[in-house]
Amino acid sequence: MQRNVVPSTVEPDKEGKPHVLEQLIKLISDNRSLTRAERKKMREHLVGCLYCQAFLGEYLIESIEYDRVNSTSEIPARNLIARLEKVMHKRLKEDIPAYVETVERSGEDEAYKHFSLLVSHFVDCQECRAEVEGLQSWLRQAIQKGLIEPFEANVRSRQ
């Protein structure tokens, strides 16, 4: 029985960037081998693209369930998802300063529009939530002490 697992829960990309989803699906579901150049392009893209990382993560989760139901080894998928989680966590943490700035300037709704994967990550990651809270606290203290100017949204809300 061939796997026919295609994740449906990953949000569509809002930035219009080219992705490697088609290559990922072909590679995984058709057991298609890629050329060296295709593998290199896919790796380079996956390192920086949270959208494709989330897609791959959803695929691996569904693959683990498939393996469980069909009594096949879950170990390869579990090992890959563990590596993927480390890469995604590192990449998501890079967005925290921009997320906090967007929250301070435009509010949480606007920040969610631009950082929905990061916000979803906060549900399970105390470390990243604490980093956001720490950065927000530092910003407030720096503004109160006059070390930095308040963000425009804060200025408008005080008037």
Image (cartoon, grey):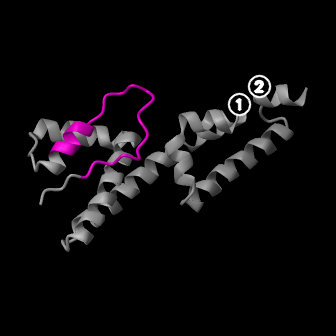
For image coordinates 13% across by 56% down, the residue present is 2
Q: Amino acid at mark 1?
A: Arg
For image coordinates 63% across by 32% down, the residue present is 110
Residue reaching furthest to the right? 159
Can you give x and y, in whole percent of width and height, for residue 133 in the image? 69, 52
Helix, strand or loop under label 2: helix
Can you give x and y, in whole percent of width and height, for residue 96 in the image? 57, 44
Q: Residue 152's mark?
A: 2
User: Residues under labels 1 and 2: Cα distance?
Assistant: 6 Å
Asked whether the residues under the numbered discs 1 and 2 touch, taking CB atoms below 8 Å apart as contact, a structural biologist would say yes
Q: How many marks?
A: 2
Disc 1 crowd rating (10 Å Cα; few below 14, some 14-19, many 20+) is some
Judged by its main secondary structure, the magenta piece is: loop
- Can residue 147 be seen here? The reply is yes
Q: Quadrant of the C terminus?
A: top right
Quarter-of-image position of residue 35: top left
Disc 2 crowd rating (10 Å Cα; few below 14, some 14-19, many 20+) is few
Residue range highlighted in magenta: 5-26
Helix, strand or loop under label 1: helix
Q: Quadrant of the N terminus?
A: bottom left
Task: Specify whether 143 is left or right of 123.
Answer: right
Task: Specify whether 127 is left or right of 43.
Answer: right
Closer-to-camera residue (4/52): 4
Task: Specify whether 78 is left or right of 142.
Answer: left
Can you give x and y, in whole percent of width and height, for residue 73 in the image? 20, 72
For image coordinates 35% across by 53% down, the residue present is 58
Q: Residue 18's mark?
A: none
Q: Amino acid at mark 2?
A: Glu
Closer-to-camera residue (116/4): 4
The answer to whether residue 17 is above or below residue 118 is: above
**Residue located beneath label 1 in the image:** 105
Quarter-of-image position of residue 145: top right
